[in-house]
Image (cartoon, rainbow, N blue to C red):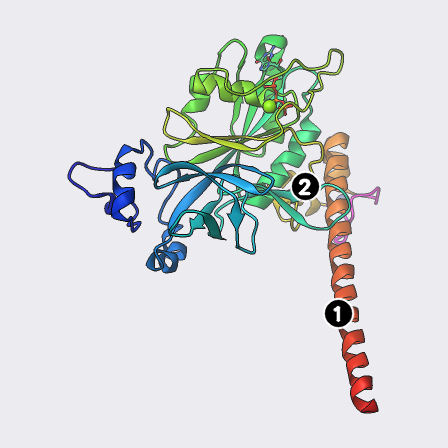
């Protein structure tokens, strides 16, 4: 915060030219409010010496980034870094603020396997502390899908908070809460109705000032409606879901970060069609803790829990949940193999080139 008497330089220690000083004083935002903290300071230090300024990406479009900078919100159209910035990133701006020089290392980013065939991570949102995993208590309700979101969060090292929205559409929500708690693996479960403005303050108090939260969930779950409620006005477009199966219409298409009056930031995301967690299967033991525990009691040490006699897992766990677990394991193994194969292909191509060069060399 700009305390009385402190010059603008005290803000982050960002070197600011005299011309920019005036503008900075007028800027209502300070960087701590925007989520800047000691994590980013060391990585930024060398840039600071070059006169660069940090900025946070609030939203992105093809080839353009809307950033919150020391002089307020500006649109930057040039990026020279190797990493392409995504919403939530802290970036380094050249001293004239005209281009992004680099993306600062990320602290907790929501990532998944890129949709489609490529074996690559897609960063959905950078520098996220908490993910609101939103599920509607209409046809959207699906504990199996929730498991996938939870694995995605754990692998991304982002703390999940499960939000059961649309409580107004559900009679037996206490059964739903109990079931969700069993699946949530220790994460908090919050009931709300964005439409009726219920539970909004409780959600607001789940996040600390300076933190960044992101809205995850399928299209139509009510993510943008929740953001609108927290803001107090209808900034985000929302659309009714399809009757019959409660599916949304993919209304939100851009990832956008917003500073709320509570002092923390919230990112609206488009509803995901594919939730394939990225990374090793390690997040799975957090999300399915009882499986590891039961596995110790199977008759065979190398039991794969696929119908072997004396299997404690098959006997002790809900069939749907076990299937969900197996599917995630299969996907993780498949990705791992594919990744190895593509590495092999790269190696092979490299050696081919080397051999060819050698042959040409010998011919000379
Ligand atoms: N009954 C009821 N409807 C709600 C509630 N919250 C949101 N809705 C409605 O659900 C529909 C979808 O809401 P959105 O906020 O657009 O959903 P979204 O998750 O942002 O969807 P995408 O942007 O497509 O990913 C809208 O018609 C909302 O009014 C709620 O608590 N109860
Ligand atoms: Mg939306
Ligand atoms: Zn077993």
Give the labeled residue for mark 1. 347
10 Å crowding of disc 2: few (<14), some (14-19), many (20+): many
Q: Is residue 44 left or right of residue 117?
A: left
Please name the residue shown 83% across and 44% down the image: 309
Task: Tell me the quadrant of ligand 3.
Answer: top right
Q: Is residue 206 left or right of residue 299?
A: left
Residue 90 vs 136, above or below: the answer is: below
Is residue 156 shown above or below 201?
below
Q: Which secondary structure is most common in the magenta stretch?
A: loop
Query: Which residue is situated farthest in the front direction here?
Result: 19
In the image, taking residue 205 as reference, residue 286 lies left or right, namely right
The residue shown at (43%, 37%) is 74
Q: Decide whether residue 304 is among the magenta residues.
A: yes
Quarter of image, res 287: top right
Q: CA distance from mark 1 to mark 2?
A: 38 Å
* Disc number for residue 179: none
Callout in the foreground (1, 2) = 1
Q: Position of residue 30 (x, y in %)?
A: 32, 37
Q: Position of residue 342 (x, y in %)?
A: 76, 60
Say if 216 sits above or below 129 in the image: above
Which residues are drawn in magenta? 298-310
Residue 153 part of the magenta-drawn span: no
Frontmost residue, 148 versus 108: 108
Q: Residue at x 59, y 25 (%)?
A: 134
Taking depth in this image into account, of 25 and 113 the one nearest to the observer is 25
Return the disc, 1 or 2, that comes first in the chain's sequence.
Answer: 2
Residue identifier under label 2: 291
Rate crowding at label 1 as few (under 14), some (14 to 19) or many (20 or more) other CA atoms within 10 Å.
few
Q: Position of residue 274 (x, y in %)?
A: 71, 35
293 vs 265, nearest the viewer: 265
């Amino acid at each position: 915060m700009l305390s009385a008497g402190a010059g603008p330089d005290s803000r982050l220690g960002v070197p600011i030219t005299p011309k920019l000083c005036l503008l900075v004083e007028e800027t209502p935002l300070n960087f701590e409010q925007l989520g800047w903290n000691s994590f980013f300071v060391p990585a930024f230090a060398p840039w600071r010496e070059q006169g660069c300024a940090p900025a946070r990406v609030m939203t992105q479009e093809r080839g353009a980034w809307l950033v919150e900078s020391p002089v307020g919100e500006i649109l930057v159209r040039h990026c020279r870094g190797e990493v392409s910035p995504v919403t939530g990133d802290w970036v380094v701006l050249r001293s004239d603020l005209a281009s992004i020089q680099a993306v600062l290392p990320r602290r907790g980013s929501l990532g998944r396997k890129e949709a489609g065939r490529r074996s690559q991570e897609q960063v959905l949102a950078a520098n996220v502390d908490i993910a609101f995993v939103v599920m509607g208590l209409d046809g959207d309700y699906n504990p199996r899908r929730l498991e996938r979101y939870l694995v995605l969060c754990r692998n991304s090292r982002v703390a999940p908070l499960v939000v059961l929205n649309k409580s107004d559409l559900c009679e037996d929500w206490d059964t739903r809460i109990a079931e969700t708690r069993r699946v949530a693996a220790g994460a908090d479960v919050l009931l709300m109705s964005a439409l009726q403005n219920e539970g909004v303050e409780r959600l607001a108090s789940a996040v600390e000032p300076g933190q960044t939260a992101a809205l995850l969930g399928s299209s139509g779950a009510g993510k943008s409606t929740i953001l609108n409620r927290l803001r107090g006005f209808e900034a985000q477009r929302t659309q009714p879901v399809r009757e019959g199966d409660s599916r949304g219409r993919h209304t939100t298409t851009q990832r956008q970060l917003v500073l709320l009056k509570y002092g923390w930031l919230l990112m609206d995301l488009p509803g995901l069609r594919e939730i394939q967690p990225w990374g090793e299967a390690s997040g799975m033991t957090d999300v399915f803790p009882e499986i590891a525990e039961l596995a110790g009691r199977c008759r065979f040490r190398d039991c794969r829990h696929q119908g072997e006699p004396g299997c404690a897992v098959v006997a002790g766990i809900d069939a749907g949940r076990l299937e969900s677990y197996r599917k995630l394991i299969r996907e993780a193994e498949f990705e791992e193999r594919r990744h190895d194969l593509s590495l092999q292909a790269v190696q092979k191509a490299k050696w081919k080139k080397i051999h060819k060069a050698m042959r040409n060399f010998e011919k000379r």
